[in-house]
Image (cartoon, rainbow, N blue to C red):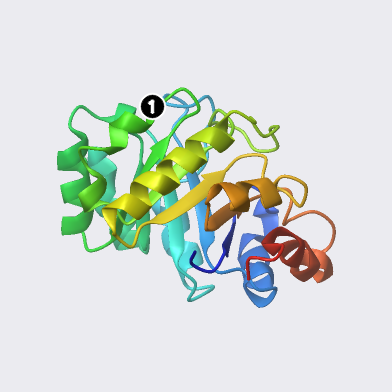
Amino acid sequence: MSSILIAPSILSADFAALGEEIRAVAAAGADWIHIDVMDGHFVPNLTLGPPIVRAIRKTTDLPFDVHLMVSPVDPLIEDFAAAGANVLTVHPESGPHLHRTIQSIKAAGVKAGVALNPASPVTLLEPVLDELDLVLIMSVNPGFGGQKFIQSQLRKIEQVRKLIDASGRDIRLEVDGGVNAQTAPSVIAAGADVLVAGSAVFKGDPDGYAQNIKALRQDGT
């Protein structure tokens, strides 16, 4: 398996000091910065848009892993790519033509991911797997941070890992939702190689972020 990457979700950061928070987790050993974009329509919350991504892009050279929980998603792809995203991940349910959406992401010059909600079947990936750079398994229902890990998603992680391995493609398998030092071992064992964590990373003072990230990596460094 590829090395385990940690992608702190800035949804749990102190938004009054967002730039400093991003610099702190970067210095603490984060591999990616995970950015949750919510529209108050596709999910019941409202977060940030391209201007914020553009503003924080100057704070770090780490890849921006942008999760678009919006519908319709297609009109926003170019804006988020231009703002500094390195990966754009979309949901099959967020537009009428998933393959076309993925093509638009690639045409914008960034990597493409597809996210599966807890009730979304793995079969949704099969027609587009050859186009993907990342698959994101949501282990909570999207919309809010701090939720409890849904244990049934471990089986889905295992299924997607087998699908990726059988494809022979270099596709990252990311898990987001309730990931902490207690749940990370089973998530890694099931086949994930990118862990998104919000409250588990941004808890306590910035001086403790490095230890929080180390606790998530377990033995998968």
- Image vertical order of residue 159 relative to residue 27, above or below: above
Q: Residues within 10 Å of mark 1 (few under 14, many from 20)?
A: few
Q: Position of residue 70 (x, y in %)?
A: 38, 34
Which of 107 and 163 lies nearest the eye of the viewer?
Answer: 163
Q: Position of residue 8 (x, y in %)?
A: 61, 57
Q: Is residue 85 left or right of residue 26?
A: left
Q: Which residue is mark 1?
A: 121
- Image vertical order of residue 206 relative to residue 171, above or below: below
Q: Quadrant of residue 68?
A: top left
Q: Quadrant of residue 149?
A: top right
Q: Could you tell me which secondary element the residue under label 1 belongs to?
A: loop
Residue lying at 53% horizontally and 24% vertically, measured from the top left: 44
Q: Is residue 188 left or right of residue 90?
A: right
Q: Is residue 3 left or right of residue 198?
A: left
Quadrant assignment for the C terminus: bottom right
Q: Position of residue 204 (x, y in %)?
A: 84, 57
Q: Position of residue 86 (x, y in %)?
A: 36, 63
Residue lying at 53% horizontally and 61% vertically, measured from the top left: 33
Q: Look at the image and tell me whether residue 9 can be seen.
A: no
